[in-house]
Amino acid sequence: MNQTVQNPPPKRPRGRPPKAAAVADAAEPAAPRTNDPERTMADILEVAMQEFADKGLAGARIDEIAAATRTSKRMIYYYFGSKEGLYIAVLEEAYRRMRQIESGLQLAGLAPEAALRALVGFTVDYQLAHPEFIRLVMTENIHRGEYLAQSRSIHELNVPAIQGLREVYERGVREGLFRAGLDPVDLHMSISALSVFNVANRHTFSLIFQRDLDSPAALAARRDSIVEMVVRFVRK
């Protein structure tokens, strides 16, 4: 009785199975594999902004950012060079977003005091709505501005903010509404200080003084107070 002799199955090369090897090789692409690199970079910046804001530069993890954006560490490094490069890009993006909205206030079409009130109110509202911006700035101040100093665009991003305030202030002086001799950069610092403190310290203030500073009434009253303080300081 003849028996059918079956050929043995071909031997696989030693090492990872072909499917597993392909999956592993695809996990860390040598270069970005995307048809929309701008969207990929925007997604990375969005996630990285929250990661750096929550954990600081030292605590943030590129692994976490890569996982949340369904990309790879290698791709992030391809776009931004390093963890520090991504952090600098996040700082630039945070400032760019604020200044872009600020530039749309159309202050030139308002009377000087109305324009100043609009600018101060916007600053208060923006800081309150974007606490991640404040945390990022606080983190960079811990590093004494070391990484912001490496930015090629941060100065240009903030020049329009000072120029817009300067124009409002100088119009008010010419019309006899604002007192002369104020430095627009110093005025900008005062507006920022009040707006930032309103967010950065509200938790400790709430606990120490037993006040609900997050209630709508408290937020509105504090906003009005900040706007009024700045306007009365500038008035002639």
Image (cartoon, rainbow, N blue to C red):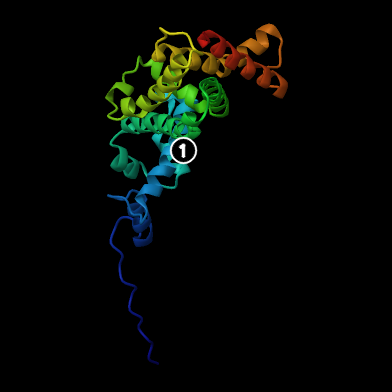
The location of residue 20, given as percent across then percent down, is 38, 57
Q: Which of 157 and 108 is in front in this view?
A: 108
Q: Quadrant of residue 188?
A: top left
Residue drawn at x 41%, y 22% as measured from the top left: 167
Q: Quadrant of residue 156?
A: top left
Q: Taking the image as drawn, is residue 64 in sight? A: no
Q: Taking the image as drawn, is residue 67 in sight? A: yes
Residue located farthest toward the front when viewing the structure as drawn: 175
Q: Which of 40 and 93 is in front in this view?
A: 93
The location of residue 235, given as percent across then percent down, is 53, 10
Task: Label 1: state its secondary structure.
Answer: helix
Q: Which of 120 and 194 is in front in this view?
A: 120
The location of residue 21, given as percent across then percent down, is 34, 56
The location of residue 151, given as percent across then percent down, is 29, 27
227 vs 54: above or below: above
For the N terminus, the quadrant is bottom left
Residue position for label 1:
47
42 vs 98: above or below: below
